[in-house]
Image (cartoon, rainbow, N blue to C red):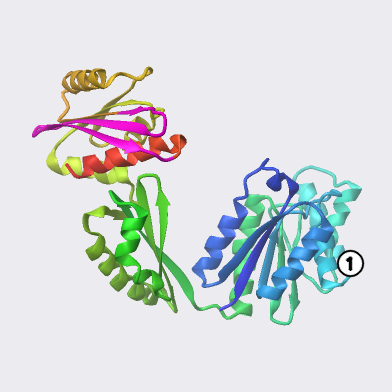
Amino acid sequence: MPSAEIITIGTEILLGEILDTNSRTIACKFRDVGIDIYRKTTVGDNAQRIAREIRRSMERCEIVITTGGLGPTVDDPTREAVALAMGVELEFRADLWVQIRERFRRFNRIPTENNRRQAYVPEDAIAVENPVGTAPAFIIEQGRRSIIALPGVPREMEHLLKSAVMPYLRERYQLGELIKIRVLHTAGAGESQIDALIDDLERLSNPTVGLAAHSGQVDVRITAKGDSEQDADDRIQPVEKVLRERLGAWVYGADQDTLETVALAHLHLKGWKLVVVEAGLGGEFVRRLAAVGDGFIGGEVLPVLPTLEELISITDNFHQLRKADVSLGVAIFPGADKQEVCFIINTPEEQKNISRPYGGPPAYAPRWALHYGLDLIRNL
């Protein structure tokens, strides 16, 4: 299977003025057809630097795809950079100029002379018409390698990627393999605990198994290559079975499942309704549950951090006021070297007060408290 590198072009991306979403879109499309992404690079609007990165990428992989820098202005240097990297000149394409002028006519606009720059492409390039914008794309082939230059506007890039680039790549590289990913979500265990239980699975080659730790939860990713979706599924399923056996109740869902949805579904099976009182989490607990809705009947975000005794009292009163079956009170109490997170849980069966220290970055404490609290609910 071919490998690829993505080069996003634009000083505004380097400076953080805009967010690069194009790389993710391309990576997902390539993943689905079995193209391995080796590297993603961002380069500012400088033709020499872009050309250097293109040449380096061509030494490592078969497909180099760029986004951005195809506009009409001086700071749109991708055409010049690709020509420089390939050692060729730019050439004017009259048919592209006709297409560009037609786009402007449809937009009830008149192109300026600098728009004519967009009708230039490197010698021997395959021009790709852009029906949704004014910047044509192009492809250059060198042996088995391909350089693909796409516009940076996400809507235009996505359209050309789907309509022109992916069909081109499927035919040129005879793509038949695909990559499929299955993600198991866990809560209640740390990354090192899970790693100790599945380290042998993390050494597999196809499928591969990897971990992604978040505050209060860990994802286990299974990635398989196959000749078909069924082939990939057949590789994933036995590994997923072993993972679920080893990790047990720590696994709360897969793929699009969320901890709040699973927690509320658990209460629904019991016929219980939930209310939440939170302090120090910025309202995130209430927002996440309210977005699901079913089984969540009310939340209160305290504007001032209470004492533990006040949290208990407020949670009890809110429980009775809303006639809830389950109430959860959660507050983050700051400390010198760690924070103390307290949970108050009332159910028809018991009342519990739980206190847990959190020693990670203070900014991550609300998310950790959210995941820990939702995990408590799903295990009631």
Q: Position of residue 64 (x, y in %)?
A: 68, 68
Q: Is residue 139 visible?
A: no
- Residue 72's x, y, as percent? 83, 50
Residue 144 belongs to the span the image colors magenta: no
The residue at 23%/35% (across/down) is 295
Residue at (35, 75) in percent of width and height: 235
- In the rendered structure, which amino acid carries the disc numbered 1? Glu
Majority secondary structure of magenta residues: strand
Residue, disc 1: 91
Give the magenta-colored segment's residue range.
331-360
Closer to the camera in the image, 177 or 127? 177
Image mark count: 1
Instruction: Name the residue furthest front.
Output: 336
Q: Which residue is at 46% across, 70% downward?
A: 179
Indicate left or right for 255 with 141 as reference. Answer: left
Q: Is residue 27 left or right of residue 307?
A: right
